[in-house]
Structures are given as structure tokens and as C-alpha cells.
Image (cartoon, rainbow, N blue to C red):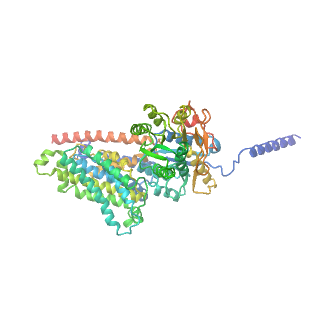
Amino acid sequence: MKFNLLRKLALGTLALAGLFAAALPAQSADQKKYTIYLSNSVIGNDWLQQMLRSAEVSVKKGPLAGRVDLHIETVENTVQAQINSLNNIIAAKPDAIIVHAGSVSALDPTLERACAAGIVVVSFSQVVTAPCPWKVNTDWTSTNHDIPVWLAEVLGGKGKIIVDRGLPGSPISEASNKEIEAVLAKYPGIEVVGWYTSNYELGAEQAGVAALLAANPQIDGILTAGYGTGAIQALKDAGRPMVPIVMFAYNGSATACAQEPGLKCMIYTHPPYLSADAIKLAVDVLDGHPPANNLTENNYPRLTTDVVKGDFSKGAEFIKLEIGKNVFPDLPPGLVLPASPAWLDITPQEAAGTN
Amino acid sequence: MKRSLSSLLGRTDGWGMPLVVLFIIAGLIELMRPGSFGLEQLALICASAMILVFVATGETIVVMRGGIDLSVGGTLSLASVISATRADLPGLDLLPWLALILGVGFLIGVANALIISLLKLQPFLVTLATWSIVEGIALIVQPSEGGTVPPVWFAWGYSRPFGIPISVLLLMLLMLWWAWFRRTRMANSIRAAGSNERSAYLNRVSLMGTNIAAYGISGVMAALAGFFYATQTGAGSPVVGAQYVLPAIAAVVIGGTSLAGGRGGLTGTITGAFILNLTGTVVFLLKLTSYWQIVAQGAILVLVVITGSIVEARSERSGADR
């Protein structure tokens, strides 16, 4: 009798355990813990710090919780230092390396060596040209196409604009400049009356716009490659009315955009959580579920005050700016939106480092 | 013993102390990760250090002449983008092309020297200006990172003549060149002019001639660095040079060459470049956050300069005692 009771209890416990096991996500053989290094070229701006925070959060919660032993190695923005650092990382034989490269080509031979050593390599944001690494990035072709289209459409196909060249020597800026010129050629009513160089810095943007405002009595739109708030300030300082502005998805820019009366704007993004996407991709590859393509490009939704119709890229999506929902006046202006990919829940506070 | 060590270090043109530091760093690395200096690892270390070594070589000669050359940043960038423009050329046609790249570097150096000598301007200002001009030209040649290096050059950058990795071989060649050059009349004139222009002039040393030689060598070395960068990465970058200007000056100073001119040499500079290069590895192996590398490099700079000056003062005193 006693034995029976014990047996029943044991069986019941087993059944219960089985039930729990079925309810939990599959903790099978492929739930190995991996050592992953993040090789980062430089730190110093808001985007990069949020990128590192996103990577850290991504291995603490959500599907990757407890699955990754993450080491972050940041160098001081020289190619040589990053190659040295990668050589050390390769010698440590990790499962994967995710790379935020300071150069699109200079790390190629080193990364190829990492691949040859059996390490999974994922390049994100400024992706490298070496064929072997997996790559995750913003769909810049679509973004660069949609930026001038939005401005031209919101101006009704007619007006004088000024354009930011971004950072000289940077492949992203160079590609963007070319595409902007190509698209604007299709709008004969839009005239570019000036270019300035912001280096993606707030001060240089404001100075560049101010100089062009002084030189041109009529400016109807501004294509910034950066904060946009510098352009807004320059307009105010010059006593000029607000004109439509394209800007990057900083929380401060989006807030200014949502709060400034009469300002029309469009905000495009290149999310820092690409680092989290890269870690997930590395784990997927290590688990034996690689993506179909070597290159993953995402056409991220853009925020705007004015949704307009036009010849936008395939899959382009525009979302109305809404304070508290996709813009956060209480959080730091340097926070880049959106804070989290759909597969993870990085809160805006976690992304901003204020939690 | 203490005294004889300091006088021994004091006799080394300033490279004794940095060499001790380099051995300590290398020893630490070998202790924490045995086998760090096998041929394969050595090839990697040399390949990544050589660009800095080339730039710092030219800088050493200019600093010995009592000047400073910031334009090496622009020259390196320009040479790297020119190297990446002619992927279509077959093997032998590339030799004149390489000569042209080095020639451009030489001309930039000569231009610096002429402006400095004829107009009697500060080398810092002149080379800051030419850096900007040359980097602008590099951006015009190739507006962003990219291009393709001729396959022959890329293969050369990873070749192993006589089984020796090319970077190690280049380092050996550079040291042989220095062993010859340091004893030449030109090297002596450069040191003399760097130490005291007036007395050098009175001794019939050509101030302009030594400037042309020093800045010319610096230009060629920076162009060589740009060429080597291109062979290592397979592409050119119009802005990469800026990353090497200050580290090159730091390598020169760590190596014991006096910024006041007149004294120093390449042995110390190469040592300095490797110290800067290996600091990152120590920080990595100590599992410290990588920002410590920047702190460590600054600390080593200060340490080497202070101990160097103490050793020098002592050896001078012991020399005076005798």
C-alpha cells in the first residue's frame, strides 16, 4: 500500500514535470551556451553607446537569456587597433565574433582568418566587404531613396533645398549623396541651392545650415544627415519660418519635431539594436539555423508628421509621430528610436541607460 | 651596478629604456598566453605594426632634424587610394606605378621642406596645411573607402619570400637601411642641423638640403605606409592617415628621440611602435575593459619619458665625474 502510494506520487511528479517541460520553451541539446565577442571600432557618440547597451540587454532577457557569454572589446577608432584586438579575440577561440567595423575593407583579411578558424562572424551596421561574414544592416538603398522623395513630395515637387553631405570619406554618406542626387534629378522643380558638411555633429550641422541660410533668402526644405535640431535652431536664430526637415531618429529630434508648431518632418532610423540582431543571428547560425541569405537588410519604418504619397521604396512604412508612444520627451535626446526589435523587449529606458 | 646599468642605458641613443619596457610587455604576454610570439603570431603582430613603423620612421628623421611632419597623414591616405585605383594593370606595369606612388610622397615632402626653408615658417603649421591639402586631394581621387588593389600587390602583402612573412622581412630591411643610413654624412648633417641650426650652418651643413632629405624621406615612408596599408586591406581609404599621425609622434618620443631635435634613432622608434601595438594585447589578456589600453599607452609615454630623462641626467653626471 505504502509502496503504491509512493509509486503514484513518483509517477505524478514525473507527469507534472513532463507537463512543465512541455510548457517551457524547448530546452534541448541546441540550448548550448556560446562565447561571443563584440568587436567595436569606437565609442563616443550616443548611437554607439546605445548599441553596446542593446547588446548587453539582449543576452540578459528574452530568447537569448543565459545563452551567451558576451565580451565587449572597444578600440579607439583605429583600424590597426581593431585588427590587433581581433587577432587577440581569434586567439581566444570564441564561438562567434560580431563586428562593428571601423572600416568596410581593412578588416577583411582578419575576418576571413576568423572564419577559416571556424568562428562564426557577423558584421553589422557598417558591414564589411569580405564575403565570409554574415551581415545585418539597415536597408540603406531604400532609406536613401525615400529621404529625398518624402521632401520633394511634401514640398509639392517645387522648392529650393539644402543638403547635408554627412561625413566625408564614409561609404554610407557617399552612397546617400549619390542616391539623393539621382532621385532629385527626377524632380525638376526641386533645386539644391547648397550643400554643407555636418560630420554627423550637432554644432557643425547648425553652423552649416546657418551659413547657407545667410547666403540664400529662400530655402524651402532641409535634408540633414544628423540631428535636425541644429537646423531648427539655425532657422530660429535667423528668424526664418520652419521648413520641412528630414532628420535622423534621435529622441530629441523627434521630440522637437512633434512639439514645434508648424514643423513638418520625416525621421529615418538606423537602430543601435542591430548589435542585438547580430548576436541573435550568430546564435541562430551556431544552433544550426542560418538565415537563407548572407546579407539581411531591413527597411525600418519611419516616423513622420505628414504621411504623403509618392514613389517610395518597396515595403516603406511611415508612422505618425506620437508623444509617449514612439517619442519620449522625458528620456535623453540622444536615445535612438526605436529602442527594440520585435523579437526582444528592450525598454526605451534600458536603451537610454536610465533604468 | 645601478650606476653601470644607467650609464649603459644612457649610451643607447635613448632606446635602452623603451627596449626594457618592450621586453617586460612581451614577457607578460608570453606568460599569460604561451606561444604568443611564434612565427604565425609574429607575422600578424608585424603586419599590424608595420604601417605605424613606416610613418614613424619618416617622423623620426624629421624630428631629428628639429622639425615635425603632420602631412604624413594626408600622404598615407593619398598613397593608399592611388594604390587602389589600378586593379587592371598586369604585374610588371605595376613597378612604375609603385615608383609614382613613392614619388608623390617624395614630392610632398620636398614641397614641405621648400616652404619651411624658403619662407622660414614653422614646420607644424606648414605640414598641418599640406596635410589638409593632400587629404583633400585623396578625397577627390576616391571619395570614400574602397577601390581595389591589383591582385599581385594583395598577394605580395601576404607573401613569404624565403619562408619569412613579408612584414617581418620589411622590418628587417628597414633596420638594415637604418644601420647604413645612421652612419652616412647626410644623417650626421641632419642631426647637426636639428641640434643647432646656427652652428651647423657655420660648419657648412646645408639647412635646406637636410630639410629636403628629412621631409623627403618622411614623404616616401608615409607613401610606403599607404601602399602597405592597401596591400594589407585590399582597398584604399582617403581618411585613414589621420589615425597614424599622433601615434607615430608618440612612437618617436617613446623611442627616445628628442622632440628638440638632434638626438634619437630608428631603433627606439620601432621599439616604441611595438610597445604601442602590444599594450592592447596586455590589456586584453588581463581581461580589463579595452579603455585601459588608452590609459596604459599614455602612462607608458609618461613613464618612458621620465625614466629616460633621469637615466640621461645620471649618465651625463657619471660622464662628467670621469
Residue B184: horizontal and vertical position, in percent? 19, 57
Q: Residue B221 versus residue B114: which sits nearer the camera?
A: B114
Note whether A344 is above or below A90 in the view shown: above
Residue B160: horizontal and vertical position, in percent? 39, 64
Note whether B221 is above or below A339 in the view shown: below
Residue A260: horizontal and vertical position, in percent? 53, 32
Q: Is residue B261 left or right of residue A126?
A: left
Tell me the quarter of the picture where residue B35 sits: bottom left
- The mark total stands at 0
Q: Is residue B60 left or right of residue B41?
A: left
Q: Residue B230 versus residue B289: which sits nearer the camera?
A: B230
Looking at the image, the residue that sits furthest to the right is: A1
Query: Is residue A316 shown to the viewer in this render?
Result: yes
Q: Residue A281 versus residue B88: which sits nearer the camera?
A: B88
Question: Where does the C terminus of chain A fall, quadrant-wise?
Answer: top right
Question: Where does the N terminus of chain A fall, quadrant-wise?
Answer: top right
Tell me the quarter of the picture where residue B167 sits: bottom left
Q: Is residue B75 left or right of residue B185?
A: right
Residue at 30%, 55% in the rendered image: B221
Note whether B114 is above or below A243 in the view shown: below
Residue A224: horizontal and vertical position, in percent? 48, 42
Query: Is residue A166 shown to the viewer in this render?
Result: no
Looking at the image, the residue that sits furthest to the top is: A330
